[in-house]
Image: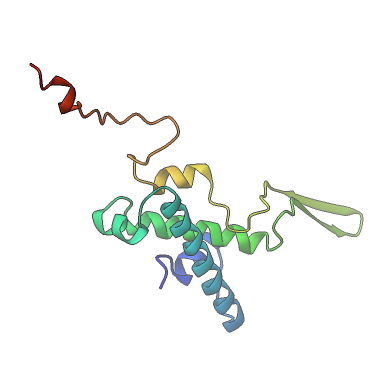
Amino acid sequence: MTYATIEQVAARLGRPITDPLEIDQVNAWLSDIEAAIRAGFRRAGFDLAAQVSAGEPIGDEVASVEASAAVRRIQNPTPGRTSRTESIDDGSVTDRWESSSDPWAITDTEWELLLPSAAPGAFSVRPSFQPDRGCHDYW
């Protein structure tokens, strides 16, 4: 079971999700999104469930990211597509958005919200000096 629910996705989407096929699809997408988040945590050296149990991040934050990613997928079901144009008579409306080729792309801001603040990174510094006891035995 995912942290996000159909109701949370519907609230962010601004409409109810009642069609059984759409419910199944959104639930599948939520599972896929959570799998991507779990994989990101593993790459950072953490376990998502253990971190949520420890309160960093809290489950509501994970649910928010999952629901937001699902809404992005609903609004742009074709990854890589960056615009949509609808024409009626002499007028047309074009919607443009940023897109990634990754259908489950979690934004950098969302990763900052999710990953523990002590996550190891390329520029992190962790003092771990242990003096070599053998070289000072003559003192």
Residue 80 in sight in this render: yes
- The residue lying furthest to the left in this view is 139
Q: Position of residue 97 (x, y in %)?
A: 69, 48
Q: Position of residue 44 (x, y in %)?
A: 42, 47
Residue 50 versus residue 61: which sits nearer the camera?
50
Relative horizontal placement of residue 106, taking residue 113 as reference (left or right) = right
Residue 123 versus residue 54: which sits nearer the camera?
123
User: Residue at point 45% right, 65% down?
Assistant: 8
User: Residue at point 60% right, 76% down?
Assistant: 22
Q: Position of residue 136 (x, y in %)?
A: 14, 20
- The residue lying furthest to the top in this view is 139
Q: Where is residue 117, by image quadrant?
A: top left
User: Residue at point 33% right, 61% down?
Assistant: 49
- The residue lying furthest to the front in this view is 138
**Quadrant that contains the C terminus:** top left
Q: Position of residue 89 (x, y in %)?
A: 91, 59
User: Residue at point 51% right, 42% down?
Assistant: 108
Relative horizontal placement of residue 69, taking residue 121 as reference (left or right) = right
Q: Where is residue 87, by image quadrant?
A: bottom right
Rendered view: 112 above or below 27: above
Rendered view: 58 above or below 129: below
**Tally of numbered discs:** 0
